[in-house]
Image (spheres, rainbow, N blue to C red):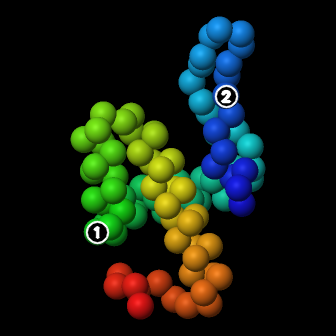
Amino acid sequence: MGTLLAPVAHDSGPRRGRRAIRGGRKGVRNALSMAALSASRYNKALAAFATRLRNAGKPAKVVLVAVMRKLVIMANALITQDRFWSPIAP
């Protein structure tokens, strides 16, 4: 899942362009973006994380992708530890 949210650089010589996410599976990315949008509003920890990024001046899509990445990391941790998600970690 490492390439699912990996940014692709648009650099050429001295020019430094914006990054874009193009690799990975589009269906998974789309589902993850909808989950991240909801989580950034209703999950207390992720909402605080998103608010902190917005207050730091990050663009909306950068905030959304950061929340998506957090969700992937959380899902991998839950699968690795063979446990269900709970608001308070054990």
Q: Position of residue 17 (x, y in %)?
A: 59, 19
Residue 90, quarter of the rendered image: bottom left
Q: Residue furthest top?
A: 14
Location of residue 19 (image quadrant): top right
Question: Which residue of the protein is positioned furthest toward the left in this rendering?
Answer: 55
The residue drawn where x is 63% and y is 49% is: 5
Left or right, 55 with respect to 9, comes to: left
Tag 2 residue? 9
Residue extending farthest front: 14
Above or below 66: residue 61: above
Graded by Cα atoms within 10 Å as few (under 14), some (14 to 19) or many (20 or more), the crowding at tag 1 reads: few
Q: Is residue 58 left or right of residue 15?
A: left
Separation of marks 1 and 2 at Cα, in angstroms = 32 Å
Choose the circle earlier in sequence order: 1 or 2.
2
Q: Position of residue 3 (x, y in %)?
A: 72, 50
Q: Is residue 69 above or below residue 8?
A: below
Identify the secondary structure beneath mark 1: helix
Say which mark, if any, is on residue 44.
1
Residue 31 at what x, y percent from top left? 59, 59
Q: Disc 1 residue type? A: Lys
Q: Is residue 13 visible?
A: yes
At x 52% / y 56%, what residue is drawn?
A: 68
Residue occupying image coordinates x 46% and y 40%: 62
Q: Is residue 34 visible?
A: no
> Which amino acid, mark 2?
Ala
